[in-house]
Image: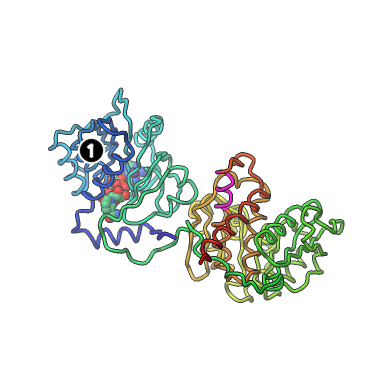
Amino acid sequence: MQALYLTSSLRKLEQQYASEPLMERAGHAVATLARTLLAEGHNRILVVAGPGNNGGDAFVAARYLKAWWHEVTVVFAGQRASLPPDAAHAYDGWLECGGEVLNTWPETGAWQLAIDGLFGIGLQRPLTGEMADLVARINALSLPMLAIDIPSGLAADTGVILGTAVRATHTITFLGRKPGLYTLDGPDHAGKVHVDLLGLPPLPEADGTLLDAPFTLPARRRLNSHKGSNGSAGVIGGAASMTGAALLTARAALLLGAGRVYAGLLDPAAPALDADYPELMLRDADQLPTVHALAVGPGMGRSPQAYAALQQALANPAPLVLDADALNLLAADADLQHRLAERASGSVVITPHPGEAATLLATDTASLQADRIASALALAERYQAIALLKGCGTVVATPDGRWWINASGNPGLGSAGMGDTLTGIIVALAAQSLPLLESTLLAAYLHGAAADAAVAHGQGPVGLTATEVMLSARRLLNRWLSTAHAG
Ligand SMILES: NC(=O)C1=CN([C@@H]2O[C@H](COP(=O)(O)OP(=O)(O)OC[C@H]3O[C@@H](n4cnc5c(N)ncnc54)[C@H](O)[C@@H]3O)[C@@H](O)[C@H]2O)[C@@H](O)CC1
Ligand SMILES: [K+]
């Protein structure tokens, strides 16, 4: 788990430590990392410096790399007279050590590495015109690319591309990790992220948290345990022609450790048995026994029966996972919203994808995605529930204003049934008595990590299936448990 900081917090730090030589340290850190990315010996490096302090970092890095006997070409997209004071000082330092500044793109280069110091956290509006052209030229280089602080063009708080953005292979980010590196378009543009604290003491409390490890696990199972000790999970969904979704959720709940799993199916013609998993107990949707945790929505449809099932589920005090059509029903009905509001805060998690989330917030998907953290927080506040907003860099938020971004996962998760599987993992963990927030956070990370492990075994990203992800998740969870409980 790593701390995430919004630009407003980083700006406060910048002011607090204004007397420290932060730019000198930043440039040195860039040059040091650049050196590790290059082969031994003499290299040719392109450095692109922009009009602000990100450009200042780039001039300092260029100076160090030149001092270390590399051949450094600096392209500057700005005016010396308009540079902020530290960056102007760095510019002068570069000239004083014999460096040259080009104001136009060089014809030829044959560089081994490019360094992007065009814009950092001071980017204020979409890149257009000459700046956009410069980014296009940088991206056309097809070189290892080291971005300073954040790939130029990427918004640090949101991961939104402002006009266009540099596609880096590495990003060295200063003082704290920016959420924009980890959600929406950030991961595609940042490459591998390195953090440098610029020699400062431990930073203040984080704004958010990066989920990059299984920080919490269900309790160790006692030898003297039985299926009743491992919790019962219920799944309601599976209307006509959509029973598969509910079965996937139920299977995931079984494979991730619920002692008993009941699937309440809405399709009157639903099979009485899951032939591949006869362990599952299939029932009519209104015939579920009392369970320790309940998931509602996969393949549920929006029929009056689905509505009634959701209404009933909201009266059930068990931890509740609402997914898929349960969310669409909820978004459209004040009575359901009222029933949700009457539940204990934090006893429900809603797991929308961006389209469902936009419906829940009565907005459009583009506006919702423009700030995924704010959107997840708004969902949590509006519905007084834990909100898990799916997508690249899934965001989890709570009604009391905390948020997390999940770092695991890959494009293989973009296929049918993956959301149903995630819902099954959450309900399985909650059934095993892990608190609902912890269940949600662990499930988000586990689901992505399981997909990553499957890809590492050649099962994706192309063609990765939900079934493979749940089997992989079972393996991973057991591995984590055995490591955590060893000894
Ligand atoms: N936060 C910190 O404490 C530190 C920051 N440092 C560096 O300073 C950076 C932030 O510096 P700045 O605040 O000067 O910001 P930037 O260097 O990111 O950019 C600001 C400049 O870009 C211009 N600009 C913004 N958007 C533009 C657009 N769309 N088209 C054209 N011009 C545009 C602004 O007018 C301004 O001149 C960080 O990202 C980091 O690299 C480091 O020097 C070390 C310490
Ligand atoms: K940059």
* Most frequent secondary structure within the magenta stretch: helix
Decide if residue 31 is on the left or right side of residue 297.
left
Ligand 2 falls in which quarter?
top left
Residue 197 picture quarter: bottom left
Q: Is residue 455 magenta?
A: yes
Please identify the quadrant where the N terminus is shown. bottom left
Residue 404's spot in the image, x, y percent? 48, 61
In the rendered image of this protein, does residue 163 appear above or below residue 346? above
In the rendered view, would you say 390 is above or below 322?
Answer: above
Q: In the shown orientation, is residue 450 left or right of residue 137? A: right
Q: Is residue 287 left or right of residue 418?
A: right
Q: Is residue 73 above or below residue 280?
A: above
| Of 401 and 130, the residue lying toward us | 401
* Residue shown at 77% from the left, 61% from the top: 280
Q: Which residue is mark 1?
A: 65
Q: Is residue 197 above or below residue 186?
A: below
Dot 1 alpha-carbon crowd within 10 angstroms: few under 14, some 14 to 19, many 20 or more: many
Display colour scheme: rainbow
The residue lying toward the viewer, choosing from 231 and 348, is 231
Instruction: Please give the range of residues in magenta.
Output: 448-456
Report the amino acid beneath label 1.
Leu
